[in-house]
């Protein structure tokens, strides 16, 4: 199944797509978050171009696991994404995905300044890889 993950922000939407085997997440260029109609149209085009069957959207929970305003924003965006694409959308706990993406970029030798350009899609990769790993035999939810 072809799946893409999104790290939804107010400025950019990070994007990652799983390989054909569903084993690895690969970054795609981020999508501008506004205007929202254009962002949704871009994601619908991505779904067609990549043959996607599902979106996994990072749900930004607080460290305590409680939902806040950011989670409400993402839930609303996910509902609009379903309308725009007709695809399944699954919300996935994204706590610490941006922190992990930043750590991975630094470990790869990418400077903090240069890393900002890649951070959103790197966070989407972390979200998608977590989702993919959880579906493997013995994977953790």
Image (spheres, rainbow, N blue to C red):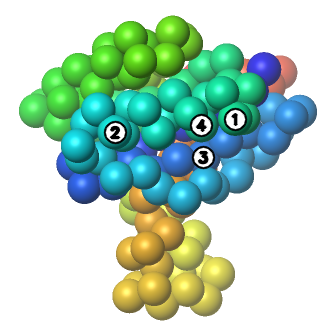
Answer yes or no: do the residues labelled 4 and 1 have beta carbons within 8 Å?
yes
When the figure is inspected, residue 20 is found, relative to residue 86, above or below; the finding is: below
Near mark 1 (Cα within 10 A), the count class, few <14, some 14-19 or many ≥20, is few
Say if mark 1 contacts mark 2, CB within 8 Å. no
**Which quarter of the figure is the C terminus placed in?**
top right
Residue holding disc 3: 16
Q: Of circles 1 and 3, which is in front?
A: 1
Q: Depth-wise, is mark 4 or mark 2 nearer the camera?
A: 2
Task: Tell me if I can see residue 61 in this picture.
Answer: no
* Nearer to the camera, 96 or 35: 35
Residue ID for mark 1: 49
Q: CA distance from mark 1 to mark 3?
A: 14 Å
Asked whether, in this view, residue 4 is left or right of residue 136, the answer is left
Is 3 positioned to the left or the right of 42 in the image? right
Gap between marks 3 and 4, in whole Å? 11 Å
- The secondary element bearing badge 4 is classed as helix
Q: Which residue is label 4 attached to?
A: 46
């Amino acid at each position: 199944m072809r799946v893409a993950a999104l790290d939804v922000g107010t400025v950019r939407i990070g994007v990652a797509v799983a390989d054909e085997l569903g084993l690895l997440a690969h970054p795609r260029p981020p999508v501008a978050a506004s205007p929202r109609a254009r962002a949704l149209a871009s994601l619908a085009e991505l779904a067609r171009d990549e043959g996607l069957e599902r979106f996994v959207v990072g749900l930004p929970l607080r460290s305590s696991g409680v939902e806040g305003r950011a989670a409400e924003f993402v839930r609303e965006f996910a509902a609009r994404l379903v309308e725009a694409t007709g695809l399944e959308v699954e919300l996935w706990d994204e706590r610490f995905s941006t922190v992990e993406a930043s750590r991975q970029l630094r470990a790869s030798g990418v400077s903090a300044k240069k890393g900002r350009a890649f951070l959103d899609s790197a966070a989407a990769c972390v979200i998608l890889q977590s989702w993919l790993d959880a579906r493997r035999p013995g994977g953790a939810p």
